[in-house]
Amino acid sequence: MSRDDRDTCDERDGRWSRRHFVGVGVGAFVVAALPLAIHRRAVVARRTVPLMGTIAELTVVHRDEQVAQSAIDAAIGALRRTEWMMTRFQATSDVGRANAGAMRDGVRVSGETATVLGHALDWAAASEGRFDPAIGKVVELWDVANRHEPPPSGAVRPLAARGFWRAVDLSSRGDAHAVRFGDRDIRLDLGGIAKGYGVDQAARVLRERGIAHAIVNVGGDLYALGDAPDGEGWHVGIRSPHDARVVAATLRVSDQAVATSGDYAQFFSWRGRRYHHLMDPVTAVPRVSPVKSLTVQADDCMDADAAATAAFGLEEHSARRVVRQIARSAVVIPMA
């Protein structure tokens, strides 16, 4: 089958068609194309930029292109600000400074980082440690993007079942926020929640700029602002974890977020086993899962992001129970 044939396959066999899903197609999601009549009444402004270790794609529908482009500029600024504060890869970020010094002294962090870390600790408690924002040392040890075989078991075992999140102290006095560690092996890694927060902030900025119809899609985290311009919810297609050309499920999303965690995007294979980037804090190895991916639809992207990470690897009923500890109205969609 040629590439052109694949791109126009009928929806009945599950493959997406450029006639139906175009434009917003980064990572785990594709979003339905806007009807031609909408294009004639409004500008569809799109921007794709590398951010947060992935690709961010923003789509704004508005009558005034200058307004749309300016709003996208501001939304990208919000995403970059979140990355600047919360990345673990920069020594000058809040997370970088905490990892360097919070075992010795309390390290001051911004109010936004404190908000995200506090919510991450709430998810850790609700999931009984399945979501742990303090297992950065485990993530660094496995370094899935660069490894070709597992690290020595002697390096892994000491990091298993430590409950690092319990030894993170976050204190606030007025506008001052500080982080202190009670365990020398703690390293913060907000990768399972900060991207969702950034998406929420980008959507907030768009709304403040008068944008009523937009999509913010950053890798596996997406927020659909308002309805699609045809008056109905945005059609968001979830790609199959086995074939990126196949839409495995379609959601209607309006003023809501969708996030996906899966074992198929970041991994290495060794002796017939796939080792992916989603670590199990109990075993300090990549989580064993009955499904290839898990998608969560929730009211905000920060919760959807954390929920998808916390519940990945659980059977469906257990995943729903964990997710609804905090995101009570969330929808959980597993993909085998």
Image (spheres, helix red, strand yellow):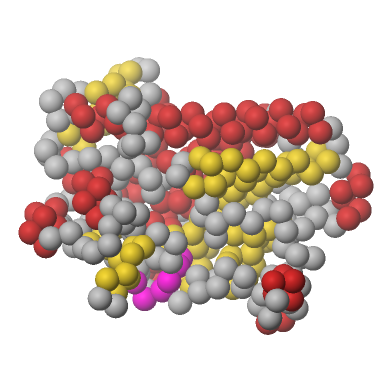
Pick the residue in front: 9 or 83.
9
Q: Could you tell me which residue is drawn at 68 percent across and 58 percent down?
A: 31
Over which residues does the magenta segment extend? Answer: 288-294
44 sits left or right of 101 in the view: right
With respect to residue 125, does 103 lie above or below? Answer: above
Q: Could you tell me which residue is drawn at 28 percent across and 52 percent down?
A: 143
29 sits left or right of 270 in the view: right
Q: Is residue 238 visible?
A: yes
Residue 86 location, quadrant: top left
Count of marks placed on residues: 0
Q: Could you tell me which residue is drawn at 81 percent across and 33 percent down?
A: 65
| Quadrant that contains the N terminus | bottom right
170 sits left or right of 294 in the view: left
- Residue 82's spot in the image, x, y percent? 46, 33
- Residue 307's spot in the image, x, y percent? 42, 55
- Specify whether residue 293 is painted magenta: yes
- Residue 185's spot in the image, x, y percent? 14, 42
| Quadrant that contains the C terminus | bottom left
Residue 168 location, quadrant: top left
Q: Residue furthest front?
A: 2
Q: Could you tell me which residue is drawn at 40 percent across and 25 percent down?
A: 111
